[in-house]
Amino acid sequence: MENIHIYHTNDIHSHLKRWPRIHGFLTGQRTSHTMQGEEFFLFDIGDFIDRWHPLSEGTAGKGNIELLNQSFYDAVTIGNNEGVNFPFEALNQLYEDAKFDVLVANLYKKSNNHPNWLKPYKIYQTKKGTRLGVIGITAHFHHLYHLLGWELTEPIAELKKWIPIVKEKSDVIIVLSHLGLPHDEKIAVECPEVDVILGGHTHHTLSEGKHIGHTLLAGAGKHGKFVGHVTLSVDANKNLLSKEAQLFDVLDIGAPQNEKNISKELFRKGKKQLKQEIVTLKQPLEHDPFQVTELSRILCSALREWCKADCAFINSGLLLGSLSGKVTKFDLLTICPHPINPCKIRLTGRELKELLLETQDENWSKRKVAGLGFRGTVMGVSIYDGITFKDSFIYINETLLEPNQSYSIAIPDMFTFGHFFTNVLSDKEKEYFLPEFLRDILSWMLVKLA
């Protein structure tokens, strides 16, 4: 009987504080299994990179690739943070120094060919000849990929296309799925040929895995809190006898003595790359999430002008600090770390009024927000540009809002991905502005105003 050990991480999101102990743990496990004559494989399931961290922003993600190289990953798939948070050329060059395979079956160039830095699948063979067919798929943000110059196919349909091909060449089929748990469960039902699904995207934690029919689902949460481990037992005829999943709590893993220094050095390395000065402010721009400030007004005005919209709205919680004196790229990353893009939507006056009244709710500013690109904590007060509330009326550019008139409003794109408003935006066509983040348009406006 052959024991095959598969370790996996997902949704690290550049939370590198505990990375030194994760690296040490993986290195030790590899050594231990190898000494026992057992097979060791290591995969990441996407969103390893997140541009809130100076290392990721300052090196355009390549600092993260170096970390994966140092831990000798066998393969990764990409998440939406790698896929839609970099301009086309940055993603196209991101993995050029990778010493591991990048597996993404459903990502294509507009020529309908896979880019040369990825493969749809890879067959890995153990020393005893067991063949592991590994396929990667990523979340279907088709519209955003298209705007950046890529084509993304529906992942489960793409997976079904490759499974028969991989099945002929392998004894075990493993899917690296950055789709989320509901989609993984669907794959298990519709694709019983799949033996193991290593999952991510929805940050699900499956302490002992989840069995659906023949398929084992695994997931290791988020931010490097856990490392996943799947053990496969295969007999001499290459029959899969058993499969088990477990999670290692990273806080229970012994930390190297220099852990803090290593993680601080990663931060400093990125900060050094972001020292370029953007502008010198004559007056400080203060921040307060529960007050309207000049800084929040500037960001909202920049959003409206960038999108060429009639009006704009932001939440002040998007800004995490103040600016003064010389402002660098690092300063802008610090106060606006979100991978959030501008978005423009057209609404009738009646719909726009409904949306704006919801932003005036007394509980709005204290609302806790997590995910959807937001890297702050609370919503903060509502900031408007081109919108005025007077008595019981709403004015757009000093003209009374008309219920049947059409208006365009610029908003942070996070409001189009979550359930912040009561059905106002769900069926509306959205115009996303990529690849610029909010901090990029804030930089643009600060230079313009200087």
Image (tube, grey):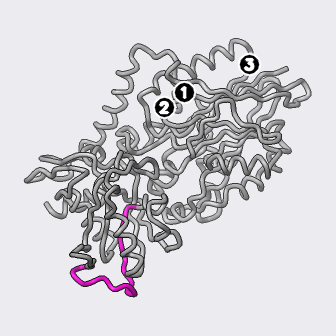
Alpha carbon separation for disc pair 2 and 3: 24 Å
Q: Are marks 2 and 1 in contact (CB under 8 Å)?
A: yes
Alpha carbon separation for disc pair 1 and 3: 18 Å
Instruction: Establish if 18 lies above or below 450.
Output: above
Q: Amino acid at mark 3?
A: Glu
Secondary structure beneath dot 1 equals loop
Based on the picture, tell me whether residue 180 belongs to the magenta stretch: no
How far across and how far down the image is residue 195, in percent?
78, 39
Q: Which residue is mark 2?
A: 67
Q: At 63% across and 37% down in the image, what residue appears?
A: 219
Q: Amino acid at mark 2?
A: Leu
Q: Which residue is mark 3?
A: 38
How far across and how far down the image is residue 300, in percent?
27, 64
Secondary structure beneath dot 2 equals helix
Magenta stretch, residue numbers: 396-412
Secondary structure beneath dot 3 equals loop
Extreme right residue here? Answer: 237
Instruction: Establish if 36 lies above or below 356.
Output: above
